[in-house]
Image (cartoon, rainbow, N blue to C red):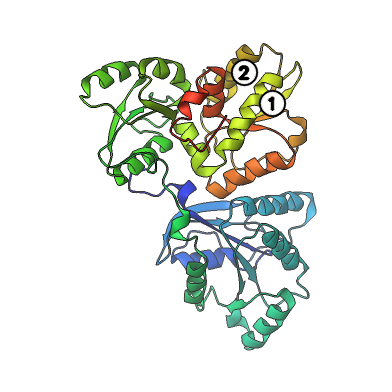
Amino acid sequence: MSLNQTPRGDRVHISLFGRRNAGKSSLINALTGQNIALVSDVLGTTTDPVYKAMEILPIGPVVIIDTAGLDDVGELGQLRIQKTFEVLNKTDIAIVVVENSYAGYDFEKDLLRRIAEKKLPVIVVLNKIDQYETEALKASVIEKELGHKVIPVSAAAKTGIDEIKRALIKQLPEEEDKFSIIGDVIGPGDFVVLVTPIDKAAPKGRLILPQQQVIRDILESDAISIVTKEFELRETLENLGKKPKLVITDSQVFSKVSADTPDDIMLTSFSIIFARHKGELAELVHGARTLDTLVDGDKILIAEGCTHHRQADDIGTVKIPRWIRQYTGKQLIFEHSAGFSYPANLDEYKLIVHCGGCMLNKKEMQYRILAAKGKTIPIVNYGVLIAYVQGILPRVLQPFPEITL
C-alpha cells in the first residue's frame, strides 16, 4: 500500500442487505462499473460478507460489503444471517435491496428496525424494475409498507444507478467529522521522531499500516517526520540539532524508548494514538486499572482486528500474556479472537485487551468498546496496557491533556 492510498479502516463502509437473489451483487457491479461481485441465479451465492475496497465516482474511496441473504435457510443459513447482522457494526451507510415478488416484508422490517437502533443512514432500493411495468406503483406500495422512500432501479439495465449515487453522497459523513490522527498535537515545522522496529510479521520492504498513516498525517500537518529504529533513537536525538516536539514509538519497545527519550520531549505510541483516533481513550485508560484487581482463575480476552502470521514472540499470544502475568503475579486464563468477528459471550471475561484496531473502521472499534461497556467488562488496548504495566502511562498521555488518570 502506498502513502497515497486510503486505508480500508478510513474508508466509508457501504453495506448491501437483502434477501437471496434480490440482486445485491449485481447492484454492486452496476455501482462500481466493474464485475467484482459473483452473480448467479442460484439462491445463496453470497454465503459470507465480502469486503471490497474501491473507488466509486464521484463518491471516492469506499469499502463495499456484500452480505448473505436475510432469508437464508437451515442451521448454516442462520449462522450466515447472524454474520450479516454483525456487518451493521461496521457500516456507515446501509443499502437495503428489495424486489417485486415478495408476499410480505418481515425480513426487511426486522433489518430496518436494527438499522434504526444503530442510527445508521439507510437507502432502500427496489431492484429488477426491468422485469415489470408497474415499478412506480410497486415502489409506492413498498414505501408505505416500510416507511422509507424507495429508489427504483435495474442493476441489469443499469438504470437508477445515478439516483443511488446521489443518495449516497447526501448520506456521506461530513468532512468535519474526520479528524487527523496526530495533527492537532503538532504544528508546522515541528520535528516528530517515529520509532519503528522492523516487524517480522509485516510484508518484506514495507512499514506497517499505522506507521504509514502517521507519516502521512505528519506531512499533511507541514511537520517533519524522522524515522528510526529503537536502537538508533539515542543517536538520532543527539544528532538532530533541534529538539523534537514528539516521539512516537511502537508500544512493544516502550521501555527502551522511554529510557532514551529525555523527559522534556513528549512521548506516546502508535497504539495509543489510534485508540484516541478510533475509540475512547479515556475508557481504555480506565480499563487498565483492572489489572490491579485480577485474581487467580480470571479469564482475559485478547482481541485483534485482523489475522496475521504468528511469530515465535507474537505480541497477542505471547508478549501480552507474559507482561500481564509478570505484573499481576496471578494465574490467569487467556483466550484469543482475531479478525472481523467479535465474541458474543463477553460476560465470562474480567478484562478485554484489544489491539490498536488499525484495520478496523471507527464505527467497528466504537462498537467493540460499547459492547464491553454494555456488559460492564473493562477494556484496554495494547499500548495503554503496556505503558501501564511499565509504569509510564502518565508520561505517554501527556500529549493528550484531555485524558486524566
Q: Position of residue 84 (x, y in %)?
A: 67, 54
**Residue 279 to residue 173: above or below:** above
Q: Position of residue 65 (x, y in %)?
A: 56, 56
Give how far apart the Cα atoms at labels 2 and 1 are.
Answer: 10 Å
Q: Which amino acid does label 1 sit on?
A: Ile
Q: Residue at x 65, y 66 (%)?
A: 21
Q: Which amino acid does label 2 sit on?
A: Ile
Which numbered dot is residue 300? 1
Is residue 340 at all visible to an observer of this figure? Answer: yes
| Residue with the mark numbered 2 | 324
Is 95 displayed left or right of 209 in the figure? right
Q: Which of 111 and 311 lies nearest the eye of the viewer?
A: 111
Quadrant assignment for the N terminus: top left
Question: In the rendered structure, which disc, 2 or 1, sits on the residue that comes first in sequence?
Answer: 1
C-beta proximity under 8 Å, tags 2 and 1: yes
Mark 2: secondary structure = helix
Quadrant assignment for the C terminus: top right
Is 108 displayed left or right of 327 in the figure? right
